[in-house]
Amino acid sequence: MRKTIFLLLVIMPMIVTGQRADYKVIPLPASITMDTGNMFELKDGMSIGFKAGNAGVAQTAGFLRDYVEELTGLQLHVIPGGKHCPIELRLVKEKQEAGVADGIFNSRYTMDVGKHGVLIEAPTEEGLFRGVQTLRKSLPVVEKAEVVELPHVSISDEARFGYRGVHLDSSRHFWTVDVVKKYIDQLALHNCNQFHWHLTDDQGWRFEVKALPELAKEGSIREQTVIDRNTGLYDGTPYGGYYTQDELREVVRYAAERYINIIPEIDLPGHMQAALHVYPELGCTGGPYSVWQFWGVSEDVLCAGNPKTIDFLKTVLGELCDIFPSKLIHIGGDECPKVRWKNCAKCQSKATSLGLKDDGKHSIENQLQTWVNHEMESYLKSRGRDIIGWDEVLEGGLTDGGTVMSWRGIEGGIDAARQHHNVIMTPVDYCYIDYYQVKNNWNAPVAIGGYVPASKTYSFEPVPAELNEEEAKYILGPQVNLWCEYVAYPSHLFYMLLPRLDAISEVQWCKPERKDFEDFKQRLEHQKAVYDKLGVNYCRLIE
Ligand code: ACM
Ligand code: ZN
Protein backbone atom coordinates (compact mmCIF):
# COMPACT_ATOMS: atom_id res chain seq x y z
CA MET A 1 0.00 0.00 0.00
CA ARG A 2 2.75 2.41 1.02
CA LYS A 3 4.54 1.43 -2.19
CA THR A 4 1.43 2.26 -4.23
CA ILE A 5 1.08 5.65 -2.57
CA PHE A 6 4.74 6.32 -3.22
CA LEU A 7 4.34 5.39 -6.89
CA LEU A 8 1.26 7.57 -7.20
CA LEU A 9 3.14 10.49 -5.69
CA VAL A 10 5.85 10.03 -8.29
CA ILE A 11 3.55 9.45 -11.26
CA MET A 12 0.79 11.97 -10.48
CA PRO A 13 2.79 15.10 -11.24
CA MET A 14 3.76 13.55 -14.58
CA ILE A 15 0.10 13.20 -15.45
CA VAL A 16 -1.18 16.52 -14.25
CA THR A 17 1.81 18.61 -15.28
CA GLY A 18 1.30 19.74 -18.83
CA GLN A 19 3.77 19.24 -21.58
CA ARG A 20 5.53 22.51 -22.26
CA ALA A 21 6.17 24.38 -25.49
CA ASP A 22 9.60 25.73 -26.39
CA TYR A 23 9.76 28.60 -28.86
CA LYS A 24 13.44 28.12 -29.71
CA VAL A 25 12.61 26.39 -32.98
CA ILE A 26 14.42 26.02 -36.31
CA PRO A 27 14.78 28.49 -37.93
CA LEU A 28 15.17 30.56 -34.78
CA PRO A 29 12.77 33.53 -34.57
CA ALA A 30 14.39 36.96 -34.68
CA SER A 31 13.21 38.00 -31.22
CA ILE A 32 11.73 35.97 -28.35
CA THR A 33 10.84 37.63 -25.04
CA MET A 34 9.57 34.98 -22.70
CA ASP A 35 8.00 34.95 -19.24
CA THR A 36 8.55 31.38 -18.06
CA GLY A 37 6.70 32.04 -14.82
CA ASN A 38 3.30 32.24 -16.50
CA MET A 39 1.64 29.68 -18.68
CA PHE A 40 -1.35 29.56 -20.95
CA GLU A 41 -2.89 26.09 -20.86
CA LEU A 42 -3.97 24.71 -24.20
CA LYS A 43 -6.58 21.97 -23.88
CA ASP A 44 -8.89 19.74 -25.86
CA GLY A 45 -11.91 21.46 -27.34
CA MET A 46 -10.41 24.94 -27.51
CA SER A 47 -10.89 26.94 -30.67
CA ILE A 48 -8.89 28.72 -33.34
CA GLY A 49 -10.62 31.89 -34.52
CA PHE A 50 -10.08 34.28 -37.40
CA LYS A 51 -12.03 36.87 -39.32
CA ALA A 52 -14.20 35.06 -41.86
CA GLY A 53 -13.91 35.68 -45.58
CA ASN A 54 -10.26 34.98 -46.33
CA ALA A 55 -9.71 31.53 -47.83
CA GLY A 56 -5.95 31.56 -47.18
CA VAL A 57 -6.31 32.34 -43.49
CA ALA A 58 -9.06 29.70 -43.18
CA GLN A 59 -6.75 27.17 -44.80
CA THR A 60 -3.90 28.08 -42.43
CA ALA A 61 -6.22 27.76 -39.42
CA GLY A 62 -7.14 24.27 -40.60
CA PHE A 63 -3.47 23.39 -40.95
CA LEU A 64 -2.84 24.57 -37.38
CA ARG A 65 -5.68 22.43 -36.02
CA ASP A 66 -4.17 19.40 -37.80
CA TYR A 67 -0.60 20.17 -36.66
CA VAL A 68 -1.69 20.46 -33.02
CA GLU A 69 -3.47 17.13 -33.15
CA GLU A 70 -0.60 15.45 -34.99
CA LEU A 71 2.03 16.50 -32.45
CA THR A 72 0.12 16.62 -29.14
CA GLY A 73 -3.12 14.69 -29.62
CA LEU A 74 -5.12 17.78 -28.57
CA GLN A 75 -8.25 18.34 -30.62
CA LEU A 76 -9.07 21.97 -31.39
CA HIS A 77 -11.88 23.51 -33.45
CA VAL A 78 -11.65 26.04 -36.20
CA ILE A 79 -14.24 28.83 -35.88
CA PRO A 80 -14.48 31.24 -38.82
CA GLY A 81 -15.45 34.62 -37.41
CA GLY A 82 -14.78 33.34 -33.88
CA LYS A 83 -14.07 36.15 -31.39
CA HIS A 84 -11.90 35.92 -28.24
CA CYS A 85 -10.77 32.41 -29.13
CA PRO A 86 -7.84 30.87 -27.22
CA ILE A 87 -5.91 30.92 -30.50
CA GLU A 88 -6.48 33.74 -32.91
CA LEU A 89 -4.99 34.45 -36.34
CA ARG A 90 -5.31 38.06 -37.39
CA LEU A 91 -4.33 39.98 -40.50
CA VAL A 92 -3.25 43.49 -39.61
CA LYS A 93 -2.71 46.50 -41.82
CA GLU A 94 0.90 47.54 -42.03
CA LYS A 95 2.49 49.70 -44.67
CA GLN A 96 5.21 47.99 -46.64
CA GLU A 97 8.46 49.91 -46.27
CA ALA A 98 9.80 51.29 -49.54
CA GLY A 99 12.69 49.28 -50.89
CA VAL A 100 11.97 46.18 -48.84
CA ALA A 101 11.76 43.16 -51.11
CA ASP A 102 8.36 41.50 -51.15
CA GLY A 103 9.54 38.11 -49.97
CA ILE A 104 11.03 39.56 -46.78
CA PHE A 105 8.04 41.73 -45.91
CA ASN A 106 5.69 38.83 -46.58
CA SER A 107 7.35 36.63 -43.98
CA ARG A 108 6.79 39.05 -41.08
CA TYR A 109 4.60 38.08 -38.13
CA THR A 110 4.27 38.46 -34.38
CA MET A 111 3.10 35.86 -31.89
CA ASP A 112 1.97 36.77 -28.39
CA VAL A 113 0.98 34.32 -25.71
CA GLY A 114 -0.70 35.72 -22.62
CA LYS A 115 -3.38 34.78 -20.14
CA HIS A 116 -6.13 34.89 -22.80
CA GLY A 117 -4.27 32.67 -25.23
CA VAL A 118 -2.28 32.91 -28.43
CA LEU A 119 -2.48 35.74 -30.94
CA ILE A 120 -0.62 35.50 -34.24
CA GLU A 121 -0.70 38.70 -36.29
CA ALA A 122 0.80 39.46 -39.68
CA PRO A 123 0.36 41.94 -42.51
CA THR A 124 0.05 39.11 -45.04
CA GLU A 125 -1.48 35.65 -45.22
CA GLU A 126 2.00 34.28 -45.74
CA GLY A 127 3.20 35.91 -42.53
CA LEU A 128 0.39 34.18 -40.63
CA PHE A 129 1.40 30.85 -42.17
CA ARG A 130 5.04 31.34 -41.10
CA GLY A 131 3.89 32.24 -37.59
CA VAL A 132 1.76 29.11 -37.46
CA GLN A 133 4.84 27.05 -38.39
CA THR A 134 6.67 28.55 -35.42
CA LEU A 135 3.82 27.65 -33.08
CA ARG A 136 3.69 24.17 -34.60
CA LYS A 137 7.39 23.52 -34.04
CA SER A 138 7.21 24.89 -30.50
CA LEU A 139 4.75 22.19 -29.45
CA PRO A 140 5.85 19.17 -27.43
CA VAL A 141 5.68 15.85 -29.27
CA VAL A 142 3.48 13.47 -27.31
CA GLU A 143 0.86 10.82 -28.02
CA LYS A 144 -1.94 12.50 -26.10
CA ALA A 145 -1.39 15.55 -23.94
CA GLU A 146 -3.94 16.54 -21.27
CA VAL A 147 -2.69 20.08 -21.31
CA VAL A 148 0.03 21.86 -23.27
CA GLU A 149 1.62 24.69 -21.33
CA LEU A 150 2.54 27.68 -23.45
CA PRO A 151 4.85 30.05 -21.56
CA HIS A 152 3.82 33.67 -21.99
CA VAL A 153 5.89 35.15 -24.77
CA SER A 154 6.23 37.92 -27.27
CA ILE A 155 7.80 36.89 -30.58
CA SER A 156 8.59 39.24 -33.42
CA ASP A 157 9.96 37.61 -36.52
CA GLU A 158 10.82 38.02 -40.18
CA ALA A 159 13.19 36.50 -42.71
CA ARG A 160 16.63 37.82 -43.55
CA PHE A 161 16.27 36.89 -47.23
CA GLY A 162 13.27 37.18 -49.54
CA TYR A 163 14.39 34.15 -51.57
CA ARG A 164 14.67 30.92 -49.57
CA GLY A 165 15.07 28.10 -52.04
CA VAL A 166 15.36 24.32 -52.22
CA HIS A 167 15.97 22.37 -55.41
CA LEU A 168 14.92 18.86 -56.41
CA ASP A 169 16.06 16.75 -59.36
CA SER A 170 13.14 14.71 -60.68
CA SER A 171 14.95 13.69 -63.87
CA ARG A 172 17.74 11.38 -62.77
CA HIS A 173 15.20 9.67 -60.54
CA PHE A 174 11.50 10.26 -60.73
CA TRP A 175 9.62 11.31 -57.59
CA THR A 176 5.90 10.63 -57.45
CA VAL A 177 3.49 13.48 -56.75
CA ASP A 178 3.02 12.11 -53.21
CA VAL A 179 6.74 12.25 -52.51
CA VAL A 180 7.04 15.72 -54.04
CA LYS A 181 4.24 16.89 -51.73
CA LYS A 182 6.09 15.46 -48.72
CA TYR A 183 9.18 17.31 -49.92
CA ILE A 184 7.17 20.53 -50.15
CA ASP A 185 5.84 19.85 -46.63
CA GLN A 186 9.43 20.00 -45.42
CA LEU A 187 10.01 23.30 -47.22
CA ALA A 188 6.93 24.67 -45.46
CA LEU A 189 8.11 23.42 -42.07
CA HIS A 190 11.40 25.31 -42.62
CA ASN A 191 9.91 28.61 -43.88
CA CYS A 192 11.29 28.15 -47.40
CA ASN A 193 9.34 29.92 -50.12
CA GLN A 194 10.90 28.76 -53.42
CA PHE A 195 10.88 25.22 -54.82
CA HIS A 196 13.24 24.91 -57.77
CA TRP A 197 12.08 21.86 -59.71
CA HIS A 198 14.53 20.32 -62.20
CA LEU A 199 12.16 18.56 -64.61
CA THR A 200 14.28 17.54 -67.57
CA ASP A 201 17.76 16.22 -68.20
CA ASP A 202 19.78 13.75 -70.28
CA GLN A 203 18.47 10.80 -68.27
CA GLY A 204 14.72 11.52 -68.42
CA TRP A 205 12.13 14.05 -69.58
CA ARG A 206 9.43 14.39 -66.91
CA PHE A 207 7.19 17.20 -68.17
CA GLU A 208 4.12 16.46 -70.32
CA VAL A 209 3.90 18.79 -73.33
CA LYS A 210 0.49 18.45 -74.97
CA ALA A 211 1.64 19.73 -78.36
CA LEU A 212 4.46 17.15 -78.35
CA PRO A 213 2.80 14.06 -76.87
CA GLU A 214 5.66 11.68 -77.64
CA LEU A 215 8.19 13.85 -75.80
CA ALA A 216 7.30 12.75 -72.27
CA LYS A 217 5.95 9.32 -73.30
CA GLU A 218 9.21 8.29 -74.97
CA GLY A 219 11.68 10.75 -73.45
CA SER A 220 10.86 9.73 -69.89
CA ILE A 221 12.00 6.12 -70.24
CA ARG A 222 15.61 4.98 -70.18
CA GLU A 223 16.07 1.36 -71.13
CA GLN A 224 18.39 0.67 -68.24
CA THR A 225 20.59 2.47 -65.74
CA VAL A 226 24.29 2.17 -65.07
CA ILE A 227 25.03 0.55 -61.72
CA ASP A 228 26.68 2.69 -59.07
CA ARG A 229 29.13 5.37 -60.19
CA ASN A 230 29.40 4.62 -63.92
CA THR A 231 30.77 1.11 -63.37
CA GLY A 232 29.99 0.10 -66.96
CA LEU A 233 27.57 -2.53 -65.59
CA TYR A 234 23.87 -1.95 -66.23
CA ASP A 235 20.78 -3.05 -64.32
CA GLY A 236 18.89 -4.15 -67.45
CA THR A 237 15.66 -2.60 -66.12
CA PRO A 238 13.67 0.12 -67.89
CA TYR A 239 13.12 3.17 -65.68
CA GLY A 240 10.63 5.97 -66.23
CA GLY A 241 7.85 8.27 -65.11
CA TYR A 242 6.57 11.72 -65.95
CA TYR A 243 4.12 14.29 -64.61
CA THR A 244 0.92 14.99 -66.47
CA GLN A 245 -0.11 18.63 -66.67
CA ASP A 246 -3.01 17.93 -64.31
CA GLU A 247 -0.59 16.51 -61.76
CA LEU A 248 1.70 19.51 -62.12
CA ARG A 249 -1.20 21.91 -61.60
CA GLU A 250 -2.11 19.99 -58.46
CA VAL A 251 1.46 20.34 -57.13
CA VAL A 252 1.43 24.09 -57.94
CA ARG A 253 -1.80 24.42 -55.98
CA TYR A 254 -0.43 22.39 -53.05
CA ALA A 255 2.71 24.52 -52.87
CA ALA A 256 0.77 27.78 -53.14
CA GLU A 257 -1.37 26.79 -50.14
CA ARG A 258 1.91 26.71 -48.24
CA TYR A 259 3.09 30.03 -49.71
CA ILE A 260 5.73 28.34 -51.81
CA ASN A 261 6.41 29.35 -55.39
CA ILE A 262 7.59 26.65 -57.82
CA ILE A 263 10.35 27.65 -60.23
CA PRO A 264 10.33 25.01 -62.96
CA GLU A 265 13.56 24.32 -64.84
CA ILE A 266 13.90 23.18 -68.43
CA ASP A 267 17.66 22.80 -68.72
CA LEU A 268 18.78 24.06 -72.14
CA PRO A 269 20.51 23.87 -74.57
CA GLY A 270 22.61 21.12 -72.92
CA HIS A 271 21.28 18.31 -70.71
CA MET A 272 18.84 17.51 -73.53
CA GLN A 273 19.68 13.96 -74.61
CA ALA A 274 16.29 12.62 -73.50
CA ALA A 275 14.59 15.11 -75.85
CA LEU A 276 17.06 14.30 -78.62
CA HIS A 277 16.08 10.65 -78.32
CA VAL A 278 12.55 11.68 -79.37
CA TYR A 279 13.56 14.39 -81.88
CA PRO A 280 17.02 13.45 -83.23
CA GLU A 281 16.72 16.12 -85.92
CA LEU A 282 17.23 18.72 -83.16
CA GLY A 283 20.80 17.46 -82.53
CA CYS A 284 23.85 18.57 -84.54
CA THR A 285 24.64 15.02 -85.75
CA GLY A 286 21.05 13.85 -86.26
CA GLY A 287 21.51 10.91 -83.87
CA PRO A 288 20.25 8.35 -83.12
CA TYR A 289 20.32 9.11 -79.40
CA SER A 290 19.10 7.11 -76.43
CA VAL A 291 17.69 8.47 -73.18
CA TRP A 292 21.01 8.46 -71.37
CA GLN A 293 21.75 5.46 -69.17
CA PHE A 294 24.90 6.95 -67.77
CA TRP A 295 25.71 9.76 -65.25
CA GLY A 296 27.61 12.84 -66.30
CA VAL A 297 27.27 15.53 -68.94
CA SER A 298 26.37 14.48 -72.47
CA GLU A 299 28.17 16.16 -75.37
CA ASP A 300 25.03 15.85 -77.47
CA VAL A 301 23.10 19.08 -77.04
CA LEU A 302 20.42 20.94 -79.00
CA CYS A 303 21.64 22.31 -82.34
CA ALA A 304 21.66 26.10 -82.03
CA GLY A 305 21.74 26.50 -85.82
CA ASN A 306 18.49 24.66 -86.44
CA PRO A 307 15.46 27.01 -86.37
CA LYS A 308 13.33 24.05 -85.28
CA THR A 309 15.27 24.06 -81.99
CA ILE A 310 13.99 27.52 -81.08
CA ASP A 311 10.43 26.56 -82.11
CA PHE A 312 10.68 23.42 -79.98
CA LEU A 313 11.88 25.37 -76.95
CA LYS A 314 9.16 28.00 -77.30
CA THR A 315 6.52 25.28 -77.46
CA VAL A 316 7.91 23.66 -74.30
CA LEU A 317 8.34 26.92 -72.38
CA GLY A 318 4.92 28.12 -73.54
CA GLU A 319 3.20 25.14 -71.95
CA LEU A 320 5.43 25.47 -68.90
CA CYS A 321 4.17 29.05 -68.45
CA ASP A 322 0.58 27.82 -68.78
CA ILE A 323 1.09 25.63 -65.72
CA PHE A 324 3.57 27.44 -63.50
CA PRO A 325 2.65 31.02 -62.51
CA SER A 326 6.22 31.74 -61.31
CA LYS A 327 7.65 35.09 -62.43
CA LEU A 328 11.06 33.36 -62.65
CA ILE A 329 11.52 30.48 -65.09
CA HIS A 330 14.79 28.52 -64.97
CA ILE A 331 16.41 27.82 -68.34
CA GLY A 332 19.41 25.94 -66.97
CA GLY A 333 22.35 26.84 -69.21
CA ASP A 334 24.90 24.85 -67.21
CA GLU A 335 27.41 22.35 -68.58
CA CYS A 336 26.70 22.75 -72.28
CA PRO A 337 29.71 21.23 -74.06
CA LYS A 338 30.49 22.99 -77.33
CA VAL A 339 32.18 20.16 -79.27
CA ARG A 340 29.15 19.47 -81.45
CA TRP A 341 28.57 23.16 -82.20
CA LYS A 342 32.22 23.62 -83.19
CA ASN A 343 31.84 20.89 -85.82
CA CYS A 344 28.31 21.66 -86.98
CA ALA A 345 27.79 23.55 -90.26
CA LYS A 346 24.37 24.80 -89.13
CA CYS A 347 25.69 26.14 -85.81
CA GLN A 348 28.69 27.80 -87.44
CA SER A 349 26.56 29.35 -90.17
CA LYS A 350 24.17 30.71 -87.52
CA ALA A 351 27.12 32.21 -85.64
CA THR A 352 28.37 33.84 -88.85
CA SER A 353 24.95 35.25 -89.69
CA LEU A 354 24.79 36.72 -86.17
CA GLY A 355 28.24 38.26 -86.72
CA LEU A 356 29.70 36.50 -83.67
CA LYS A 357 33.47 36.81 -83.24
CA ASP A 358 35.83 35.58 -80.58
CA ASP A 359 36.61 38.70 -78.57
CA GLY A 360 39.27 37.02 -76.45
CA LYS A 361 36.87 36.91 -73.48
CA HIS A 362 33.89 35.11 -74.96
CA SER A 363 34.23 32.31 -77.51
CA ILE A 364 31.94 32.21 -80.56
CA GLU A 365 30.14 29.17 -79.15
CA ASN A 366 29.61 30.78 -75.74
CA GLN A 367 28.12 33.78 -77.49
CA LEU A 368 25.93 31.45 -79.52
CA GLN A 369 24.58 30.08 -76.24
CA THR A 370 23.92 33.64 -75.11
CA TRP A 371 21.95 34.16 -78.31
CA VAL A 372 19.82 31.11 -77.44
CA ASN A 373 19.34 32.55 -73.94
CA HIS A 374 18.24 35.87 -75.45
CA GLU A 375 15.70 34.11 -77.67
CA MET A 376 14.29 32.36 -74.61
CA GLU A 377 14.38 35.51 -72.56
CA SER A 378 12.44 37.55 -75.09
CA TYR A 379 9.90 34.77 -75.53
CA LEU A 380 9.46 34.50 -71.76
CA LYS A 381 9.24 38.28 -71.45
CA SER A 382 6.33 38.14 -73.90
CA ARG A 383 4.70 35.84 -71.34
CA GLY A 384 5.51 38.24 -68.50
CA ARG A 385 8.34 36.13 -67.10
CA ASP A 386 12.06 36.52 -66.35
CA ILE A 387 14.84 33.95 -66.69
CA ILE A 388 17.19 32.35 -64.20
CA GLY A 389 20.28 30.54 -65.41
CA TRP A 390 23.14 28.66 -63.78
CA ASP A 391 26.30 30.77 -63.62
CA GLU A 392 27.56 29.53 -67.02
CA VAL A 393 25.13 32.02 -68.54
CA LEU A 394 27.74 34.66 -67.64
CA GLU A 395 30.26 33.13 -70.03
CA GLY A 396 28.89 34.54 -73.25
CA GLY A 397 28.08 37.89 -71.68
CA LEU A 398 25.07 37.99 -69.41
CA THR A 399 21.56 38.33 -70.77
CA ASP A 400 19.82 41.51 -69.65
CA GLY A 401 17.46 41.02 -66.76
CA GLY A 402 18.59 37.47 -66.08
CA THR A 403 19.01 36.14 -62.54
CA VAL A 404 22.16 34.10 -61.92
CA MET A 405 22.31 30.98 -59.82
CA SER A 406 25.90 30.86 -58.59
CA TRP A 407 26.80 27.18 -58.14
CA ARG A 408 30.45 26.65 -59.08
CA GLY A 409 31.43 28.92 -56.20
CA ILE A 410 30.44 32.44 -55.20
CA GLU A 411 32.52 34.16 -57.90
CA GLY A 412 29.76 34.03 -60.52
CA GLY A 413 27.43 35.59 -58.00
CA ILE A 414 29.92 38.36 -57.21
CA ASP A 415 30.41 39.06 -60.91
CA ALA A 416 26.68 39.16 -61.57
CA ALA A 417 25.89 41.36 -58.55
CA ARG A 418 28.55 43.84 -59.71
CA GLN A 419 26.77 43.95 -63.07
CA HIS A 420 23.53 44.58 -61.15
CA HIS A 421 21.95 41.24 -61.87
CA ASN A 422 19.99 39.41 -59.22
CA VAL A 423 21.78 36.43 -57.71
CA ILE A 424 20.85 33.25 -55.91
CA MET A 425 23.76 31.77 -53.99
CA THR A 426 24.08 27.99 -54.07
CA PRO A 427 27.81 27.21 -54.14
CA VAL A 428 28.70 23.55 -54.40
CA ASP A 429 30.98 23.53 -51.31
CA TYR A 430 28.17 24.57 -48.97
CA CYS A 431 24.86 23.95 -50.70
CA TYR A 432 25.15 20.67 -52.65
CA ILE A 433 23.31 18.24 -50.46
CA ASP A 434 23.87 15.37 -52.88
CA TYR A 435 27.33 15.20 -51.25
CA TYR A 436 28.11 13.04 -48.21
CA GLN A 437 27.27 14.63 -44.87
CA VAL A 438 29.32 12.29 -42.66
CA LYS A 439 33.08 11.91 -42.75
CA ASN A 440 33.20 8.15 -42.24
CA ASN A 441 30.94 7.36 -45.14
CA TRP A 442 31.81 3.71 -45.72
CA ASN A 443 28.39 2.60 -44.52
CA ALA A 444 26.41 5.78 -45.29
CA PRO A 445 23.85 5.75 -48.11
CA VAL A 446 25.69 6.34 -51.36
CA ALA A 447 26.29 9.95 -52.42
CA ILE A 448 27.95 11.56 -55.42
CA GLY A 449 31.10 12.13 -53.34
CA GLY A 450 32.53 15.13 -51.47
CA TYR A 451 31.73 16.17 -47.91
CA VAL A 452 29.16 18.82 -47.04
CA PRO A 453 28.19 18.26 -43.39
CA ALA A 454 25.38 20.26 -41.78
CA SER A 455 27.98 22.46 -40.01
CA LYS A 456 29.41 23.48 -43.39
CA THR A 457 26.00 24.37 -44.79
CA TYR A 458 25.24 26.19 -41.54
CA SER A 459 28.42 28.26 -41.81
CA PHE A 460 27.54 29.65 -45.24
CA GLU A 461 27.34 33.44 -45.55
CA PRO A 462 25.46 34.29 -48.77
CA VAL A 463 26.54 37.93 -49.01
CA PRO A 464 30.24 38.01 -49.96
CA ALA A 465 32.36 40.54 -48.07
CA GLU A 466 33.72 41.73 -51.45
CA LEU A 467 30.41 43.37 -52.34
CA ASN A 468 29.56 46.91 -51.29
CA GLU A 469 26.18 47.72 -49.79
CA GLU A 470 24.59 48.60 -53.13
CA GLU A 471 25.87 45.43 -54.84
CA ALA A 472 24.87 43.26 -51.87
CA LYS A 473 21.21 44.11 -52.50
CA TYR A 474 21.34 41.91 -55.61
CA ILE A 475 21.85 38.78 -53.52
CA LEU A 476 18.27 37.52 -53.28
CA GLY A 477 19.08 34.60 -51.03
CA PRO A 478 20.57 31.11 -50.69
CA GLN A 479 19.39 27.69 -51.86
CA VAL A 480 20.39 24.04 -51.41
CA ASN A 481 20.40 21.63 -54.36
CA LEU A 482 19.55 17.94 -54.27
CA TRP A 483 20.64 16.16 -57.44
CA CYS A 484 19.43 12.60 -57.59
CA GLU A 485 21.76 10.46 -59.71
CA TYR A 486 22.37 8.27 -56.67
CA VAL A 487 19.17 8.95 -54.79
CA ALA A 488 16.38 6.64 -55.90
CA TYR A 489 14.13 6.05 -52.87
CA PRO A 490 12.17 8.42 -50.61
CA SER A 491 13.90 7.35 -47.38
CA HIS A 492 17.25 8.17 -49.01
CA LEU A 493 15.90 11.47 -50.37
CA PHE A 494 14.85 12.70 -46.92
CA TYR A 495 18.07 11.39 -45.38
CA MET A 496 19.98 13.66 -47.77
CA LEU A 497 17.66 16.61 -47.15
CA LEU A 498 17.51 16.52 -43.34
CA PRO A 499 19.03 18.03 -41.31
CA ARG A 500 20.91 20.05 -43.92
CA LEU A 501 17.61 21.75 -44.72
CA ASP A 502 17.52 22.81 -41.07
CA ALA A 503 21.00 24.25 -41.49
CA ILE A 504 20.22 26.23 -44.65
CA SER A 505 16.91 27.41 -43.17
CA GLU A 506 18.83 29.36 -40.51
CA VAL A 507 21.14 30.78 -43.20
CA GLN A 508 18.03 31.86 -45.11
CA TRP A 509 16.01 33.14 -42.18
CA CYS A 510 18.29 34.33 -39.38
CA LYS A 511 20.55 37.34 -39.13
CA PRO A 512 24.20 36.20 -38.82
CA GLU A 513 24.43 37.32 -35.17
CA ARG A 514 21.53 34.98 -34.33
CA LYS A 515 23.37 31.90 -35.61
CA ASP A 516 25.19 29.49 -33.28
CA PHE A 517 25.87 25.93 -34.42
CA GLU A 518 26.10 24.42 -30.90
CA ASP A 519 22.77 25.97 -29.94
CA PHE A 520 21.34 24.83 -33.31
CA LYS A 521 22.39 21.23 -32.57
CA GLN A 522 20.53 21.32 -29.26
CA ARG A 523 17.42 22.70 -30.92
CA LEU A 524 17.68 19.97 -33.54
CA GLU A 525 16.86 17.36 -30.86
CA HIS A 526 13.26 18.56 -30.75
CA GLN A 527 13.10 18.83 -34.53
CA LYS A 528 14.14 15.16 -34.73
CA ALA A 529 11.18 14.26 -32.52
CA VAL A 530 8.96 16.11 -35.00
CA TYR A 531 10.51 14.13 -37.88
CA ASP A 532 9.94 10.87 -36.00
CA LYS A 533 6.31 11.82 -35.47
CA LEU A 534 5.87 12.77 -39.13
CA GLY A 535 7.61 9.56 -40.20
CA VAL A 536 10.30 11.21 -42.30
CA ASN A 537 13.83 9.90 -42.43
CA TYR A 538 16.84 12.05 -41.54
CA CYS A 539 20.56 11.67 -40.96
CA ARG A 540 21.18 10.91 -37.27
CA LEU A 541 24.81 12.01 -37.27
CA ILE A 542 25.27 15.75 -37.15
CA GLU A 543 28.77 16.84 -38.11
C1 ACM B 1 24.88 21.96 -61.78
O1 ACM B 1 25.13 21.44 -60.69
N1 ACM B 1 25.25 21.38 -62.90
C2 ACM B 1 24.19 23.22 -61.87
ZN1 ZN C 1 24.40 22.36 -84.62
Image: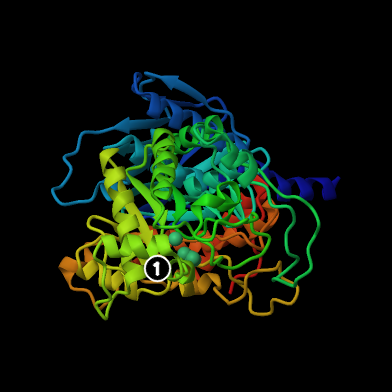
Nearest to the observer: residue 421 or residue 83: 421
Looking at the rendered image, the quarter that the C terminus falls into is bottom right
Residue 341 on image: x %, y % = 44, 66
Q: Name the spot of residue 72 as percent of width and height, x first.
A: 60, 40
Q: Position of residue 387 (x, y in %)?
A: 32, 51
By what rule are the colours in the image chosen?
Answer: rainbow
Spot occupied by residue 290 in the image (x, y as percentages of width and height): 65, 55
170 left or right of 194 in image: right
Q: Nearer the viewer, residue 161 or 65?
A: 161
Question: Viewer-proximal residue, 366 or 380?
Answer: 366
SS of the residue at dot 1? loop
Few, some or many residues within 10 Å of mark 1 (<14, 14–19, 20+): some
Ligand 2 occupies quarter: bottom left
Q: Residue at x 33, y 56 (%)?
A: 373
Residue 358, compared with residue 113, is above or below; it is: below
Looking at the figure, which quarter contains the N terminus? top right
Ligand 1 under 8 Å from disc 1 Cβ: no
- According to the image, label 1 marks what residue? 515
